[in-house]
Image (cartoon, rainbow, N blue to C red):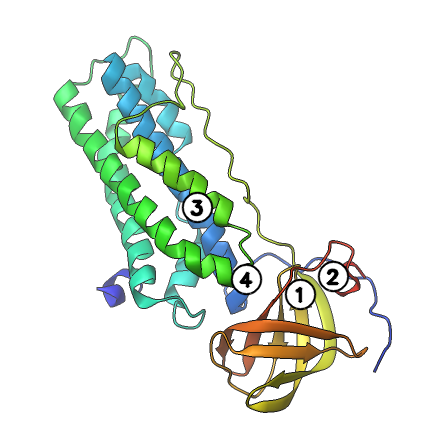
Amino acid sequence: MLGALLKSSEPIKPRRASPPVSGTADGFARFEALVCEFHWTALQIGGIASCMNASLASRRSWMLRACNNLIPVESPIVKIALRSWQDIGLPRDLAAAIARAYFDLADAKKLTMPLLDSAGLFAGPQIPLAKLEQIAVVWRKLAEDCRDAVLDLEPETRWRLNGAYTGNALLLSRFLKEAITGSQTCINQQGEVALPILPQRRQSPRFSAAQPCKIFSQAGAFSAFVRDASRNDLNVDCDQEFRLKDAVVVILRNGRKVPGLIVWSKNGKAGVRFDCPLADDDPLISG
């Protein structure tokens, strides 16, 4: 199923944030990008399901016009992350669930877009309630699948990202549950949508931190090279292959010791999540 769905002590000079995630981005950045994009997609799906609920409850098909601004678009970042699910250490079943949600989303959009075209005006053609109910069921089921995937993803984000996205998971769980049960609390009588605000919407900025380092683990001490860092992690080049969740201590060029956990390791590269997030003015990321 998955195969079908996923086809020395010198001061550090000031630095700029690294470029956005691309096809060559490391596992940590790809994982966080996937979390950000999937949370946003789940929020949009909940909004569409709520619009469907509101239209059915009021028997006003024109209320569906608000859905036009909510239709999710699958980001290339999502495709990149799901294709490399093994590289970023994503559990197979979880990767398959997220991929399936996007697969089903594509089908739901094909069914829905003609409906929205008919609901664009206050005096537009009346959409049969039976047809509207049929489409609403599709979006409620999609909202349910997204809620389950968000909750399954949360433990992974908690240990990899220091709980930065736990608030998102809690909010989405409540919001999607309401949409599944027929609620439309985010839609007013004029058909205007006010989606809840995700506590963590943007990825953590990454900064160049080029310097040699040493990594100490139970397997021994290994020479490595830090390439970039964020408040939550750093990426290194290292010939040693680590296991997920290996406890390590990274000793930077200036002798500073940074404890953390291995969150991904592949082909001579690895990501280390800090035990404690760095302060915004930490020299490692602020220059």
Q: Residue furthest bottom?
A: 220
Disc nearer the start of the sequence (3/4): 4
Q: CA distance from mark 4 to mark 1?
A: 10 Å
Give the vertical position of 247 relative to 62 (above or below).
Answer: below
Judged from the image, the secondary structure of the residue bearing numbered disc 4 is helix
Disc nearer the start of the sequence (4/1): 4
Numbered label attached to residue 229? 1
Between 75 and 238, the one nearer to me in the picture: 238
Residue 245: x and y, percent?
49, 74
**Residue type highlighted by circle 4:** Ala
For the residues bearing labels 1 and 3, Cβ distance under 8 angstroms: no
Q: CA distance from mark 2 to mark 1?
A: 7 Å
Q: CA distance from mark 3 to mark 4?
A: 19 Å
Task: Using residue 279 as the reference point, say whether residue 95 is left or right of it.
Answer: left
Numbered label attached to residue 167? none
For the residues bearing labels 2 and 1, Cβ distance under 8 angstroms: yes
Judged by depth in the image, the label closer to the viewer, 4 or 2, is 2
Judged from the image, the secondary structure of the residue bearing numbered disc 1 is strand
Disc nearer the start of the sequence (3/2): 3
**Residue type highlighted by circle 1:** Ala
Disc nearer the start of the sequence (4/2): 4
Task: Using residue 34 as the reference point, say whether residue 130 is left or right of it.
Answer: left
Between 12 and 78, the one nearer to me in the picture: 12
Judged by depth in the image, the label closer to the viewer, 1 or 3, is 3
Between 213 and 15, the one nearer to me in the picture: 213
